């Protein structure tokens, strides 16, 4: 899979992106800057990284992170609806296995569950 950097006008506020940054390669776009997790000394801290442009900025976004949809929640409201047994992601239509990690991704046909 080859990805090109996303333009600023393609970014959605309050969503996470995979890319290349000074302190992290995953960041949340706040509509103006990216928020990443870095360190100040030995302590984790939220860092601000501007959108990378020629001559300035720190974070280049390449891919919007699909945060998924809970399709088997523990309940119908509040945190019970947020957490559950099965999360569905929109990933490419292939099966992928990640070695010995115990993670296997199998996608379904559109509309299939």
Image: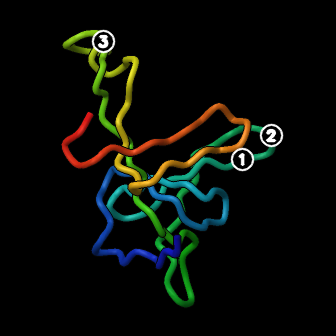
Placement of 99 over or under 64, stated as above or below = above
Q: Single out the residue that lies furthest toward the right.
A: 42
Give the residue pinned by disc 1: 39
Placement of 45 over or under 71, stated as above or below = below
User: Where is residue 30 drawn, in percent x and y?
Assistant: 36, 55
Residue for point 30% across, 35% down: 69
Residue for point 37% across, 17% down: 84
Mark 3 neighbour density, 10 Å: few (under 14) some (14–19) many (20 or more): few
User: Where is residue 91 drawn, in percent x and y?
Assistant: 40, 52
Give the residue pinned by disc 3: 80
User: Where is residue 11 drawn, in percent x and y?
Assistant: 32, 66
Q: Nearer the viewer, residue 100 or 18?
A: 100
Label located before the other in sequence (3 or 2): 2
Helix, strand or loop at mark 3: helix
* Horizontal side, residue 108 vs residue 98: left or right: left
Residue for point 27% across, 47% down: 109
Give the residue pinned by disc 2: 42
């Amino acid at each position: 899979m080859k990805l090109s950097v996303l333009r600023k006008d393609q970014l959605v506020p309050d969503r996470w992106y995979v890319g290349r940054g000074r302190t992290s390669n995953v960041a949340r776009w706040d509509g103006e800057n990216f928020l990443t997790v870095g360190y100040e000394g030995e302590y984790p801290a939220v860092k601000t990284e501007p959108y990378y442009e020629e001559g300035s900025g720190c974070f280049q976004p390449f891919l919007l992170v699909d945060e998924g949809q809970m399709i088997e929640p523990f309940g119908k409201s509040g945190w019970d609806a947020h957490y559950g047994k099965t999360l569905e992601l929109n990933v490419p239509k292939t099966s992928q296995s990640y070695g010995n990690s115990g993670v296997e991704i199998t996608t379904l046909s559109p509309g299939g569950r």
